Image (cartoon, grey):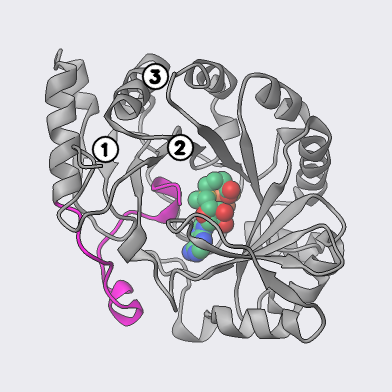
Amino acid sequence: MMGALTDRFGRHHTYLRISVTDRCNLRCTYCMPEHGIDWTPPQQILQTDEIIRLARLFVSMGIRKIRLTGGEPLVRRDTVDIVAALAKIEGLETFAMTTNGIGLAEEAARLHEKGLTTLTVSLDSLRRERFQAITKRDRFPDVMKGIEAALAAGFAPLKINIVVMKDVNDDEILDFVAWGRNKLVDLRFIEYMPFPDNHWSPGGLLPYAEIRARISEHYQLLPVVGDASAVGKEFTLAGHIAHVSFITSMTESFCGTCNRLRLTADGNIKSCLFHPAEKNLRDVMRAGGSNDELAGLIAAAVQAKPAAHPPVEELIHVENRAMIAIGG
Ligand code: SAM
Ligand code: SF4
């Protein structure tokens, strides 16, 4: 299928990640620069009707999956309203959200009821003190309550994102498997990626092959054959309910089958997580621009998408937004 969302390398873009805020109630060291970021003033953040208009336009152009992210999407007061509106867009097949789990205990059932189909919760440690050291906030019990509520609400499988950092939490890989193995979860072990001022160093990266080998010493991992554009290598865990996935952005990047576009909270379309070029859709909308004009800008961003992100040793020097201001 050729179309405005097909790039120079024949990649069809069917997946849009929308960041609804750059604010967050955690300060994860691997995501948020130590000196903080300058929060985008509220008037520069996309309003609900602007998000809905763009989401409809993207779906009319071929997007089939949308994920809401942030910052922390649940800190935005009207996120549930955004969910309710986007869930009604005809043609949207998968509607997901990634959250740190704070506030989820209160919202999980409503999010499910309003039409969110898939949920991911991030959790990098099962130990309260370590959770606090990584996130700079003592909110571990809230996250665990959020996970329970999400499972009870019917998000199945519930995806759990775990960023693996050598000498920080890599000693918990097997603890995570033991914790989740008989739950309806997909444990997604993510390779640690470099972003401006996020403490990344080559020594902190634990390659996927090693994470997998450590699990394989104790469990039999059986590959799940799935969507070719999925970023995770997914496995079942023989004799257990959970799935285990590996997000290998650093050691085995998946640029060749990338089908993702990103919309930042301030209304910029970003064609690649590691490519600084962006086109602002917010200002065009606010100046009275038509959907055709917006579609033209989106198509131009897709055409400018690079074939692949630079190798890991160069990524450290790439000028980019902080992860918290992109949304993963
Ligand atoms: N606040 C939400 C959360 O934490 O789930 C959503 C936004 S967060 C930026 C999206 C995902 O990116 C999270 O799962 C987080 O763990 C992941 N992430 C952030 N920084 C990362 C890094 N340096 N390397 C790998 N994953 C990272
Ligand atoms: Fe906030 Fe998510 Fe980034 Fe942690 S990973 S600082 S929870 S946006």
Instruction: Give percent across and percent down for residue 165.
Output: 60, 75
Q: Which residue: 51% across, 86% down? A: 203
Instruction: Give percent across and percent down for residue 24.
Output: 55, 42
How many numbered markers are drawn? 3
Nearer to us in this view, 210 or 216? 216
- Magenta residue check for 295: no
Q: Give neighbour class at mark 1: few <14, some 14-19, many 20+ (Cα, 10 Å).
A: many
- Earlier in the chain: of badge 3 and badge 1, it is 3
Q: Nearer the viewer, mark 2 or mark 1?
A: 2
* Residue pointed to by mark 2: 65
* Residue pointed to by mark 1: 268
- Earlier in the chain: of badge 3 and badge 2, it is 3
Q: Main secondary structure of the magenta part?
A: loop
- Magenta residue check for 306: yes
Amino acid found under the numbered disc labelled 3: Ile
Q: Give neighbour class at mark 3: few <14, some 14-19, many 20+ (Cα, 10 Å).
A: some
- Residue 208 can be seen, yes or no: yes
Nearer to us in this view, 294 or 37? 294
Q: Which residue: 28% across, 67% down? A: 309
Q: Which residue: 44% across, 40% down? A: 22
Please, what secondary structure does the residue beneath circle 2 have? strand
Q: Which residues are magenta?
A: 304-328
Q: Which residue: 61% across, 23% down? A: 115
In which image quadrant can residue 308 be found? bottom left
* Residue pointed to by mark 3: 52
